[in-house]
Amino acid sequence: MDWIKVAFAQELGNDEVKMVNVGGYGVALYRVEDEFFATDGMCTHGKALLAEGFVEDGCIECPLHQGRFDIRTGKAMCAPVTMDLRTHAVKREGDDIYVLSPVSQ
Ligand code: FES
């Protein structure tokens, strides 16, 4: 598995999320309290992009039915979501943000 550069740190403010492409795989990249985190980009409940959701208190709220996930752990926090999100490792080198690719090369 490879580290893929996905963004510059300044592209995201605190409590913001954006969709990034990690080797053809859609990942939601978050900045919370000046740390970066990544989860699968798609909600586990339906076909909704979490990058279109709302970040608050370390959670992402799905834009479709308002299910919430913990951004750090991927844990499903409230109905209607019951299945946790997969999380992905993130590292920062200077201004560059990398995500460990979930796709074998
Ligand atoms: S699609 Fe995300 S909560 Fe339903």
Image (tube, rainbow, N blue to C red):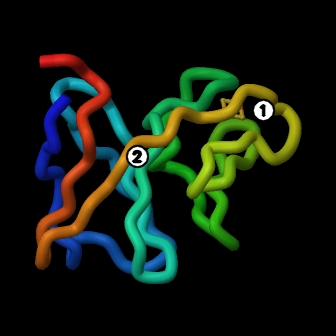
Q: Residue at x 50, y 81 (%)?
A: 33
Residue type (three-letter) at the residue carrying disc 1: Val
Quarter occupied by the C terminus: top left
Q: Residue at x 75, y 38 (%)?
A: 65
Task: Specify the quadrant of the image occupied by residue 104.
Answer: top left
Secondary structure beneath label 1: loop
Mark sitting earlier along the chain (1/2):
2
Rendered location of residue 53, percent (x, y): 56, 52
Q: CA distance from mark 1 to mark 2?
A: 17 Å
The quarter of the rendering in which ligand 1 is drawn is top right
Identify residue for label 2. Answer: 28
Task: Specify few, some or many for label 1: CA neighbours under 10 Å numbering under 14, 14-19, or 20 or more.
Answer: many
Total marks placed: 2
Rendered location of residue 11, percent (x, y): 23, 71
Disc 1 residue: CB within 8 Å of ligand 1:
yes
Residue type (three-letter) at the residue carrying disc 2: Ala
Rendered location of residue 78, percent (x, y): 86, 44
Identify residue for label 1. Answer: 81
